[in-house]
Amino acid sequence: MSVYIPVDLQRKIRTKFADCCAYCHTAELLTVTTFEFEHIIPLSAGEETVFDNLCLSCPSCNRYKASRQKVLDEDTQQEVSLFNPQQQLWSEHFAWSEDGTEIIPLTSVGTVTIYALKMNRAQLTRVRKMWVKLGEHPPDML
Ligand SMILES: [Zn+2]
C-alpha cells in the first residue's frame, strides 16, 4: 500500500536514518534502488503515518518484514517482537562481524529480525565484501 508522506516528513526520516536502511544499514547511495518509507507498525494494525512510526527501509527488508510485528523464535518457541528502529537502538541488538559483512545478533530481537528480514542473505554479504574493500561499509551509525 502506498501512502502519501509529506516531503518534510520524508526529509526528517532520511536524516534520522542517514539515508541508510534502518534494518540492514545498507546505504542507499551504494545501491541502484530507491529506499522506501516503512510503517513500523502497519496502518492495518491501527498505527498512523507519523514520524515515530516510520523508518527508511531498503526494498528487501521492507518486503520481508511486510506487515509483521512479531515472529516466532525457533529456539525458544516464543513470539518475539521485530526490531523497532524508532524505539530501539540498532547497536543494542546488532553488531557487525569483524570483516563487516554479516550482522551478528546481540539479543533475541536481533536474532528474529535478522532471520525474518534475511539481513545476511548471500547476495547482500557478497556485495558488502565489495563495499568493505571500497571503504564504504559498514556505516558509522548507532
Ligand atoms: Zn535493509
Image (cartoon, helix red, strand yellow):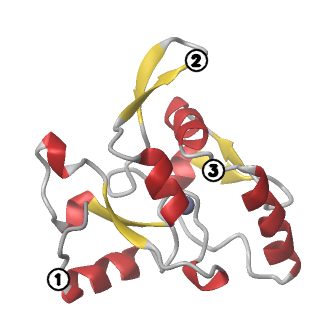
Measured as percent of width and height from the top left, residue 100 is found at: 79, 61
Tags 3 and 2 in contact by the CB under 8 Å rule? no
Residue closest to the eye, 109 or 21: 21
Quadrant, the N terminus: bottom left
Give the residue pinned by disc 3. Answer: 119
Among all residues in the image, which is located at the extreme front?
A: 1
Cβ at disc 3 under 8 Å from ligand 1: yes
At x 62%, y 45%, the residue is: 118
At x 70%, y 49%, the residue is: 120
Q: Which of the 4 image quadrants contains residue 7?
A: bottom left
Cβ at disc 1 under 8 Å from ligand 1: no
Give the residue pinned by disc 1. Answer: 6
Q: How would you rate the neighbour count of disc 2 (Cα within 10 Å): few for under 14, some for 14-19, many for 20 or more?
A: few
Tags 1 and 3 in contact by the CB under 8 Å rule? no
Give the residue pinned by disc 2. Answer: 74
Residue closest to the eye, 23 or 122: 122
